[in-house]
Amino acid sequence: MKALQYRTIGAGPELVEIETPEPGPGQVRLKVTAAGVCHSDEFIMSLPAENYVWGVPLTLGHEGAGIVDKLGEGVKGLAVGDAVAVYGPWGCGRCYPCSQGAENYCENAAAEGIVPPGLGAPGSMAEYMIVDDARHLVPLGDLDPVQNVSLTDAGLTPYHAIKLALPKLVPGTTAVVIGAGGLGHVGIQILRALTASTVVALDVADDKLALAKDVGAHYAWASDASAVDKVKELTGGLGAHAVIDFVDIQPTIDLGRAMIRVGGSQVLVGVGAGTTAVGVLAGPYESSITAPYWGTRSELFEVLEMARSGAIHVETEVFSLDEGVEAYHRLHAGTLRGRAVIVP
Ligand SMILES: NC(=O)c1ccc[n+]([C@@H]2O[C@H](COP(=O)([O-])OP(=O)(O)OC[C@H]3O[C@@H](n4cnc5c(N)ncnc54)[C@H](O)[C@@H]3O)[C@@H](O)[C@H]2O)c1
Ligand SMILES: [Zn+2]
Ligand SMILES: [Zn+2]
């Protein structure tokens, strides 16, 4: 089968021919219908060998959807032909966080060598993929796989991040989204669907600001120091109640810190290398900073329901597996609208 793999550290992804995998006991083989392209793939492929821990060759793709194609020994509750989305942050299924569906924070994954597809295990950018457990498949039902595959990360991650700040986002509040790319443009819609807050989007690219407005941001402004004044002006001088940062380089973390109000929440989702100081004198009183990772299994069900109800959608640009390398070039160049999705 064809697969898009990261094979040489420092080089880009490559289209290769590999053997079609067989599902082992308890595993499920999917015929992949769609695979999403995430900035995190680009991030890991940018790392030098000493910081790269995901192994090579790595079949890329941690956003996946497919049709159940073959069941390993002992798999129950699924039938060949079922349309499913893959819950990516695989855990052990037995520990306390996993018992709550928070496999993204599994306590045993590291010790047991459990890694997500596309981030250690073979991912979805291939004609077929192996899913380690039926538990990690969520029914897609009538949702189109190509339009919705990215909800498994670009929907789930902002949903989880926004839920952390949600108790503060009562009517009359202001939420700021930094970075209106793959995750951010879904985050804006989630905020509009779950809150009555005023939503401000900040980005450095005009087309991304236009996209932010198209998907529901009340305001879309350049991501620079002028945004602090504008947010302050909008909020009676007090600042935003929540800042969800999908970039997290030093300038955006500093922007968020400068515009958050007393008691506000700064949620750091991007894998930029920025940091910030925390302390009584380092920021507004009782403000909180948190850096979440991905989301829980039950939240993936909830995100898919939001799409089913029409509350959120993913803007997608579709590429074939043969065009996969090009999709990563477009991501790197910042010219994608929403998410690139690869259809094998
Ligand atoms: N924490 C997690 O679990 C998790 C999960 C998925 C992705 N991520 C990370 O989230 C980030 C976003 O991923 P994506 O796939 O949406 O990326 P993307 O490339 O689709 O979007 C990034 C957006 O940020 C904008 N941007 C760049 N610099 C900016 C700045 N200084 N100010 C404001 N906007 C700026 C870009 O114009 C673009 O619109 C990445 O760092 C990715 O690695 C984290
Ligand atoms: Zn991702
Ligand atoms: Zn676990």
Image (cartoon, rainbow, N blue to C red):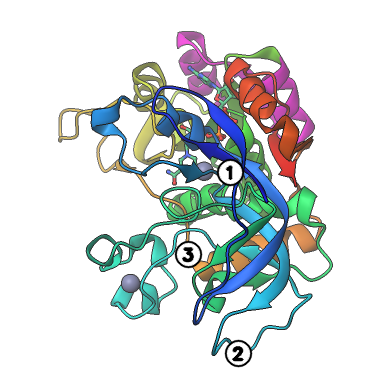
Name the front one of labels 1 and 2.
2
Q: CA distance from mark 3 to mark 1?
A: 29 Å
Q: Earlier in the sequence, mark 1 or mark 2?
A: 2
Q: CA distance from mark 2 to mark 3?
A: 22 Å
Q: Is residue 329 magenta?
A: no
The answer to whether any part of residue 239 appears in the image is no
Q: What's the magenta region?
A: 207-234
Mark 2 surroundings within 10 Å by alpha-carbon count, few (fewer than 14), some (14 through 19), many (20 or more): few
Residue under circle 2?
A: 76
Percent x, y for residue 62?
54, 50
Above or below for 183 versus 97:
above
Q: Is residue 212 magenta?
A: yes
Residue at 27 percent of width and 67 percent of height: 112
Taken as a whole, is the magenta stretch helix, strand or loop? Answer: helix
Q: Which mark is residue 296?
A: 3
Q: Which mark is residue 172?
A: 1
**Which amino acid type corresponds to the residue marked 1 in the rendered image?**
Gly
Percent x, y for residue 80?
75, 79
